[in-house]
Image: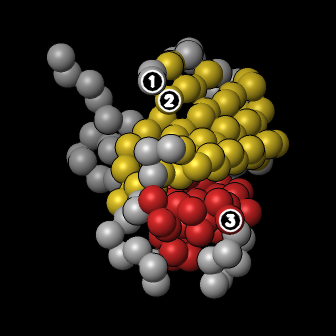
Amino acid sequence: MSVALTHFDATGRAVMVDVTDKPDSQRAATARARVVMQPETLAVVVAGTAKKGDVLGTARLAGIMAAKRTADLIPLCHPIPITSVTLELEATEGGAVEISATVRTTGRTGVEMEALTAVSVAALTVYDMCKAIDRGMRIEAVRVVHKEGGASGAFRQD
C-alpha cells in the first residue's frame, strides 16, 4: 500500500498543504493521554495540596492555551480559528491522571494536531507541577481517538 505524504512536494521538500480549494466544514478531534504516577502523588493531586497549586486546573488551562498556539509549535500546521477547546482531567484508581481534549472549528483543515498538543501540554504541566515528589511519572498513550469533518470523514478508536 503506497500512500503519498501531503507535507512533501514532488522533490521531497517539506511544504505546507494548500487548502485554498477545500470547502469550510465543521471539524472536531479528540485526543487522550495519561500521566501515570505513584498513588501518593495522585493523592496530593486530588487533595489539591501540591506546593505549586491546583495541578488539574493549571493543566487544563495550559492545554487550552497550547491548542491555540499549535501553529506556532508545529512547523507545517495551519493557524486555525478554533471555536472550542474542552479539556477533561480525571484521577483514576490505577494511579493516573487521564486527560482528554476535544477541539472544534469550522474551517478547511482538521484540528487533530490541536487536540494532540492540548493533551501533551496538559500532561507536561501535570509532570512539571508534581516532579518534586515523583520523578518517575510517565506520560503515556498520547493518541487521537476521534476525528470528524472534512473529506476523509470520521475516524474513531479506543
Residue 158, disc: 1
Marks 1, 3: nearer the viewer: 3
Q: Which residue is mark 2?
A: 145
Tell me if 41 is positioned left or right of 150 in this view. Answer: left
Q: Nearer the viewer, residue 35 or 42?
A: 42
Q: Is residue 102 above or below residue 36?
A: above
At mark 2, the secondary structure is: strand
Q: Residue at left 75%, top 25%?
A: 26
- Residue 1 seen in the figure: yes
**142 left or right of 18?**
left
Q: Quadrant of the C terminus?
A: top left
Amino acid beneath label 2: Val
Q: CA distance from mark 2 to mark 1?
A: 6 Å
Point out the tag, 2 or 1, that comes first from the N-terminus: 2
Going by the numbered disc 3, the residue's amino acid type is: Ala
- Mark 1 or 3, nearer chain start: 3
Identified by mark 1, the residue type is Asp
- According to the picture, the residue beneath numbered tag 3 turns out to be 47
Within 10 angstroms of label 2, few (less than 14), some, or many (20 or more) residues?
A: some
Residue 74 in the image, given as x and y percentages of width and height: 48, 59
Local packing at callout 1 (Cα closer than 10 Å; few below 14, some 14-19, many 20+) is few
